Image (tube, rainbow, N blue to C red):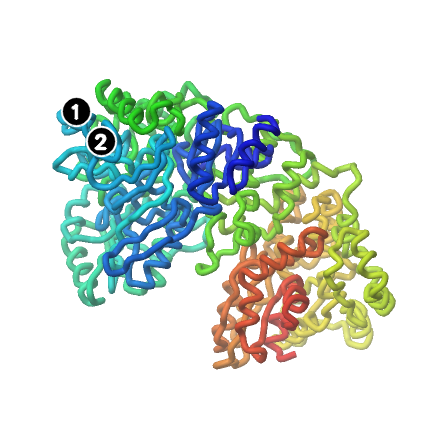
Amino acid sequence: MTDSWVQALRDRIGGEVDDSERRRAEYSSDASNYRVLPAAVVYPRRDEDVAAALEFARAEGLPVTARGAGTSVAGNAIGAGLVLDFSRHMHAVLEVDAENRWARVQPGVVLAALQRRGAAHGLRFGPDPSTQNRCTLGGMIGNNACGPHAVAWGRTSDTVRALRILDGAGAERTLADGLAAVPGLAEFGRARLALIRTEFGRFERQASGYALEHLLPERVSSAAKAFVGTEGTCGLLLEATVALVPVPRATVLVVLGYPDMPTAADDVGAVMAGAPIAVEGIDAKLVDVVRAHRGRVPELPAGGGWLFVEFAGDTADEARDRATALCAAANALDSRIVTNQEEAARLWRIRADGAGLAGRTPDGNPAWPGWEDAAVPPERLGDYLRDFEELQRAHGVDGLLYGHIGDGCIHVRLDLPIADAPQRFRAFLEDAADRVVRFGGSLSGEHGDGRARSELLARMYSPAALAAFAEFKALFDPDGVLNPGVLVRPEPIDADLRVTGVPPVPPRGGFAFLADGELGAAVHRCVGIGKCRADTRATGGFMCPSYLATADEKDSTRGRARVLQEVVRGALDWRSAAVAESLDLCLSCKACGSDCPAGVDMATYKSEVLHRRYRHRPRPLDHYVLGRMPSWLALGTRMPRLFNAVSGLGPLRRPGLRAVGIDPRREVPRLADKSFRAMWAERTAETSDAPSAHGTPEVMLWIDTFTDAFEPEIAWAAVQLIESLGHRVRIPRRRVCCGLTWISTGQLDGARKRLRATLTALDEHVRAGGVVVGLEPSCTAVLRSDLVELLPGDPRVAATAAAVRTLAEFLEQQPGWQPPDRSGERVLVQPHCHQHAVTGFDADRRILRRAGAEVTEITGCCGLAGNFGMQSGHYDISVAVAENGLLPALRTADSATPFLADGFSCRTQAAQLAGRTGRHLAQFLTGR
């Protein structure tokens, strides 16, 4: 595209048009295996923008693809022309009619937002896919999404009352019951009654192809319902009116255990006879992956496959009675009734994260969508699953099963031989299609056909049905402008595969990427499920704080991963502006490493990219200043008064900070009058060097640079706690550093040098069986995680990483230790991002609860994130991130409420932006 072409389009619409390399990379894929670079991405703000973009595309001969959250797993939301992202601006809930139970929405509204609006009236939208906290209603209508509760409340097509669309010719149409809104549609349906009655609507989850059964008079002939599931090939949605259902007054969860998934599927008739509102199946292999990723799962009944069955009632007793009746009627090995809603939510989370966690097989191989959601009539599901197991063995593929057992739909991610495409890849998909058709099933049960299955429709439908698809599309889109290559005149299933032909990335002295082997495989962990786009503040998620602040795909983990995928395939240079822009607002918070179900670790990828970009080349000045801060502070602690005086001089401070790449709106933290190490040297000179009287092991206290230089009182509080338990405290004899600031700026050679010195300083203590207690969460996390990846060949690494504890972890391991009584005291706590992601906050949480404190946890990043919030150009986004959680919480809390934050960055941000002084856990427990 030329600049004049793009400018001409910009002149026509009020939204944005972006054809940059970076933006095109971000939208080159959805949650599928496919990659197609668009010509440009358009963000319409209003209906007129959609119409103008479509008119322009028609005039220029460009295809148009509609996109919501981009979570489609079949390649439904990618295209070579204009991609219209409705989620950025057209995301309003326009109206809720509580009395008549319906809502009117724009296509880009996220389902969770509609659910919140409905909940205020005791209502909800029935279908609820696992991506509900980021998927859009437009996308759900495009794919006819379902979710666990479809057995009770139906699919999206069952909820639709009216749709306002632009067809492919640019005509605005309002679709509802009846067919008159589309010229020729009624005649089309009447001419094909026999074909439609014999091939369509055979069972509830027949989602492949167009839903022509909704043209039948016995189905009330609804153009709106027939439009649902057309995957953006028949029109661009402008507005939808959808039905809502009452929220159940009481629910209870039953978990049934079976020997395996096929046996569980055999029992679906008995389960459905109890009229549940949800029936989901989960295989033992998926539970094992969840356990490996999350650390623990709630207790499950005995078995190798489970059904999660939810019942509703007007009262809790009524719901429980139904659950008890099912346990008696089912043919399960074991069962469990879960009435605690928090525990039920944890169990449902296993299912909700299935799409991402299933991205790795039990053997650790990448697993892909592609044969994602086949469905068969429920009464044939058990036999189908046994047959599918034979198919997997025959083709040498493995994967993880889960899905909507109640209506016969199975989700699976498989280690498909994509690298061998087209040979083995095509052969498996063709055999899989033939098998599901043999069982009277559908290639897709809810996700649509997209690029993954459209070519295979010829194995499911007759030539007459395929011809009817083409004619149906032509009624809406006569020129084939909308999402070409999907459903009608399909692209080959093995064309445009994202990972095919991508060479491995040779190492350059950076991270080892032990779980993936190399950077290319690591960045392709992102399969695009988009949890990084979700607003998880209400559920305790930390991931992608910059995306929460900007709502721009550029600032999501997925968007960054897509750009890096272009880099490793050779389409973008490591040092390109596109890569720099993509990574610029990544805070290196590491939350994606724990919150992303696929295990994407963008903080590590960013560090690796900076390492490759600047190795043996001049760096930005802030890398030398902030990235090597511990070296400068080692000098500063020798003359703290001079350092504080110079950094506080107004006339010099602002231009000086600006000159070295630090935002002048930031205050430079003041050094303590005397560092902890200096005070410790004085203390040890005055006290005996003898071991403790109780003979308890020595404890190595890791004195990080920030605690040492700025807040030594925290270390003294920790010393007091540890010594009160009879331990003798040691610190490393030499000033050593974990290398965190070198890591965050990609100076990995320097980081390795410091980590080797750290290993040497700790080696004797660790070999003697001693533990190392860290106080700064980010530094402690380095010693637990980055150390292993940066020095994988050093024999001292594993033992050292295993010896490292947080203070809370150490205290919990002390027999008989009890925290001081803080009963009834309200405490506001900011967990550090690296606590959340690497070391965990559970031990801290348990200690505070044992102390009796009433704890309010702040969810999300503080926004300072080490050097990030200090760098020029980051101040505004740093404040915006703080406004996602930290600042509102501080404003709401009483000024007398203690504010706890173990992270130096968190305390600094609170002090500078809210004037609140934070305390470390050690200080809270000692009263210092």
**In what quadrant of the picture does the N terminus appear?**
top right
Under circle 2, the secondary element is helix
- Name the foreground residue: 751 vs 728: 751
Circle on res. 192? 1
Position in image of residue 439 (x %, y %): 20, 29
Amino acid, disc 2? Leu
**In what quadrant of the picture does the C terminus appear?**
bottom right
Circle on res. 700? none
Q: Residues within 10 Å of mark 1 (few under 14, many from 20)?
A: some
Q: Residues within 10 Å of mark 2 (few under 14, many from 20)?
A: many
Q: Earlier in the sequence, mark 2 or mark 1?
A: 1
The CA span between labels 2 and 1 is 10 Å
Left or right side of 574 for 192: left
- Above or below for 828 versus 57: below
Which image quadrant is residue 483 in?
Answer: top left
Residue plotted at (83% across, 65% down): 650
Which image quadrant is residue 561 in?
Answer: top right
Left or right side of 388 for 555: right
Residue plotted at (17% across, 63% down): 321
Q: Is residue 632 visible?
A: yes
Number of numbered labels in the structure image: 2
Residue plotted at (51% across, 71% down): 847
Answer yes or no: do the residues labelled 2 and 1 have beta carbons within 8 Å?
yes
Position in image of residue 294 (x %, y %): 45, 52
Left or right side of 603 for 43: left
Under circle 1, the secondary element is loop
Residue located beneath label 2 in the image: 212
Residue plotted at (73% across, 64% down): 731
Which image quadrant is residue 480 in?
Answer: top left
Position in image of residue 881 (x %, y %): 58, 57
Amino acid, disc 1? Arg
